[in-house]
Amino acid sequence: MNNIQDLNIEKEILPLFDNTLNKFSRAKVHEIFNNPLKSIEKIRYRQSIFQGFSDNKKILKDYSYSVSYLLEVYHFLKNYDLDKLPQEEKKQ
C-alpha cells in the first residue's frame, strides 16, 4: 500500500510543477500527484510527461491565452454533441 500523506504534495511538490493557466489543468495536475501508480512502466510514462514540461519551460513561460476563450470552448465541447453538428462537405 502506498502512503503519500508524508510527502507534503500540496505545499512542497505541486508548486514546482503547477504552472497551469486554468482550473481544469490545475485539477489534472493535482489528480496526477494524488493518485500513486503501481507499475514502473506507468510511473516512467508519467515522469516523461513532467519531463516534457520541464524541458519546454522556456517555451511555456511566455505562453498565454484568454481565459474567456478557454471557457467558451470548454462549455461548447461539454454541452454539444459534436457528431450532431453540421459538417461541411469536402470540395474536390
Image: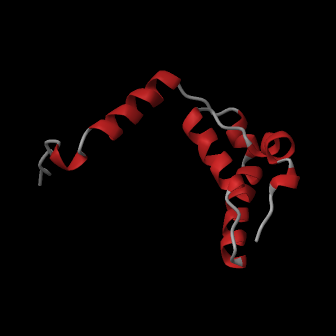
Rendered image coloring scheme:
secondary structure
| Residue 2 picture quarter | bottom right
Task: Give the answer, above or below, for where 45 lies relative to 78.
Answer: below
Residue found at x 37% / y 32%: 75
Tell which of 79 and 68 is nearer to you.
Answer: 79
| Residue 72 picture quarter | top left
Residue found at x 25% / y 39%: 80
Task: Give the answer, above or below, for where 45 lies relative to 82.
Answer: below
Q: How many numbered marks does the figure carry? A: 0
Q: Position of residue 55 (x, y in %)?
A: 76, 53
Q: Position of residue 12 (x, y in %)?
A: 87, 43
Residue found at x 76% / y 71%: 1
Residue found at x 14% / y 51%: 90
Quadrant location of the C terminus in the rendered image: bottom left
**Is residue 10 left or right of 35 when viewed as pictured?**
right
Q: Position of residue 57 (x, y in %)?
A: 75, 44
Task: Give the answer, above or below, for where 23 lies relative to 6.
Answer: above
Tell which of 21 and 37 is nearer to you.
Answer: 37
**Is residue 88 left or right of 2 when viewed as pictured?**
left
Task: Give the answer, above or below, for where 54 lies relative to 21.
Answer: below
Q: Position of residue 43 (x, y in %)?
A: 71, 70
